[in-house]
Amino acid sequence: MRRLVVVNGHPDPRQERFCAALTKAYVRGGVAGGWSTVSLSVGELALSSLQALAEGDQPDADAAAMLAEIEQADRLALVFPLWFGKPPEPLSALFGRVAPRKAHVVVTMDMPAFAYRSILRGPERSPMLAVPGIDVEAPVLIGCVSSISLEQRHAWLKTLSEYGERTHFGSTIVPSRVQAFADMIDRTVAQLWA
């Protein structure tokens, strides 16, 4: 059975975080799609473990187990919040030890996503997606996360579940009208900024 690993990159392991809910939704979709799924949470690693990873020391047993799961994945997805314009440091410290590979990336942020989306289409990739060892595949940006409605949150959870379910196609094609809407916003923003 093929293996899907979904990593919650939020440093806070509490389950009420939206990143945790998005990770669970992706995993549910993967199970529905017939994948063997594993959910990992960077926030569950001890501070000493993260510090050792950041300093290049030998990973402890928990970090080594997490790294082994990531290395064995046939498909990989990362869900993380944007912190000060980039991925959280604990996530970067963990993936600094991972062999280069592709991953589907889902980023939550407090800013409107359309501004970042237009940056991603430019000649330079934004540092917001600069996770060591990761070649980003079809990034999903969820903006204004602290102020979106409950209905919008449920819509995003459904979308992430659909991504997980479609993972068996070997592609991360957006399974709904979200991409068409995002493209329309990007085109409008590009015309205004031109």
Image (spheres, rainbow, N blue to C red):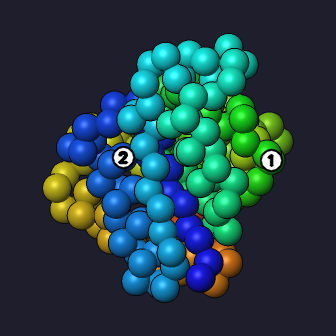
Q: Where is residue 127 shown, x and y percent of the image?
A: 67, 30
Residue in view at x 52 percent, y 79 percent:
35
Residue in view at x 40 percent, y 33 percent:
43
Check disc 1: other Cα within 10 Å, few if <14, some if 14-19, many if 20+: few
The answer to whether 73 appears left or right of 44 in the picture is right
Residue in view at x 49 percent, y 85 percent:
34
The answer, for residue 175, to whether it is visible in the render is no
Vertical relation: 111 (above or below) 18: above
The answer, for residue 41, to whether it is visible in the render is yes
- Specify the quadrant of the image occupied by residue 194: top right
Vertical relation: 135 (above or below) 146: below
> Which three-letter amino acid code belongs to the residue tagged 2?
Cys
Between discs 2 and 1, the one toward the N terminus: 2
> Which three-letter amino acid code belongs to the residue tagged 1?
Pro
Find numbered disc 2 in the image and state the secondary structure of the residue it sits on: helix
Name of the residue lying farthest toward the left: 150
Of circles 2 and 1, the one toward us is 1
Q: Where is residue 64 shown, x and y percent of the image?
A: 61, 39
Q: Where is residue 108 shown, x and y percent of the image?
A: 43, 43
Check disc 2: other Cα within 10 Å, few if <14, some if 14-19, many if 20+: many
- Give how far apart the Cα atoms at labels 2 and 1 are: 23 Å
Find numbered disc 1 in the image and state the secondary structure of the residue it sits on: loop
Residue 53 or 141: which is nearer the viewer?
Answer: 53
Vertical relation: 18 (above or below) 81: below
Q: Label 2 belongs to which residue?
A: 19
Q: Label 1 belongs to which residue?
A: 100
